[in-house]
Amino acid sequence: MIDERAVVSQEARLDSDVSVGPFAVIGAEVEIGAGTRIEPHVVIKGPTTIGRENHIFQFASIGDDPQDRKYGGERTSLRIGDRNTIREYTTINRGTVQDEGLTRIGDDNWIMAYSHIAHDCVVGSHTIFANNASIAGHVHVDDYAILGGFTAVHQFCQIGENALTSMFTYVTKDVPAFVVVSGRPAEPRGINVEGLKRRGFETAQIRGIREAYRTVYRQGLTLEEAVEALAPAARADGRVARFAASLRRGTRGLVR
């Protein structure tokens, strides 16, 4: 399953079911699970752990040093889960000791060509990164979030679950769960109704999220006042509770 023209370190650990194409380079301290396909010219450096049934396309660079001037060669790592698709020219860097020393990516993500996931990022599961979407260091992207093409996300921002950014969006603040943003800088445009429908959310559930959005963005309240106003609905509806929690957790301030 390993092409004879590939270069695989003796210190790498590959399951017998891993496929490696010609001219790929697999470095030391790389571990790859069963069923994963590595196409030609991919470069993977360690310490990096990649799970099962991933598909990494040609010319991707996985697990290289972080693009951080504070990085001094410390031992840091990258962990990727299962069933992710990582397309051409994507770059994913390891962490830094200024954070947890770990970049983490979950399961079932669709990461399209030329995307960039920087050091110390935490990406959940079932996300979509459209072409050229880039997230800077220490960014968190929650489950089912979608980043439109050429989206750029500032360091330390939080992107909540089921959030959506449109093409060419520049995110400098935290994006709450379920919210659609667009613009440079990003501004809220409503909730991700179509995405929620596709995920099976019922009409009443979407209505509850929409009302929570209006409380935050349409009533002229401060963030603290809005969170307090959402408390009764949050106690009754777990989705509203997750929306409210996403308002409080960030450090960059809320996109407004």
Image (spheres, rainbow, N blue to C red):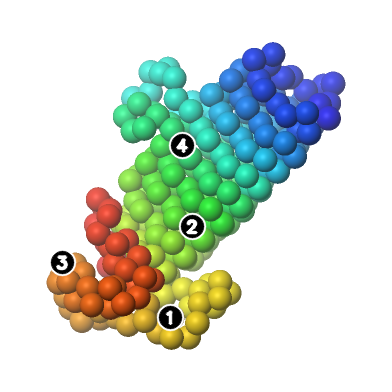
244 in relation to 130, above or below: below
Disc 4 designates what residue?
103
Disc 3 designates what residue?
224
Q: Is residue 185 visible from the viewing direction of this image?
A: no
**Residue depth check, mark 1 versus mark 4: number of the one nearer the observer:** 1
Do the residues under discs 1 and 3 have CB atoms within 8 angstroms?
no
Q: Which of marks 3 and 4 is nearer the N terminus?
A: 4
Q: Residue at x 29, y 62 (%)?
A: 245
156 in relation to 194, above or below: above
Secondary structure at badge 2 equals loop
Q: Which mark is residue 205?
A: 1
For the residue pair 148 and 2, the one nearer the viewer reads as 2
Q: Earlier in the sequence, mark 1 or mark 2?
A: 2
Question: In the drawing, does residue 228 fall left or right of residue 92?
Answer: left
> Which residue type does callout 2 highlight?
Asp
Q: Is residue 251 visible from the viewing direction of this image?
A: yes
In which quadrant will I find the N terminus? top right
Could you classify mark 3 by the number of other residues whose Cα lies within 10 Å: few (under 14), some (14-19), or many (20 or more)?
Answer: few
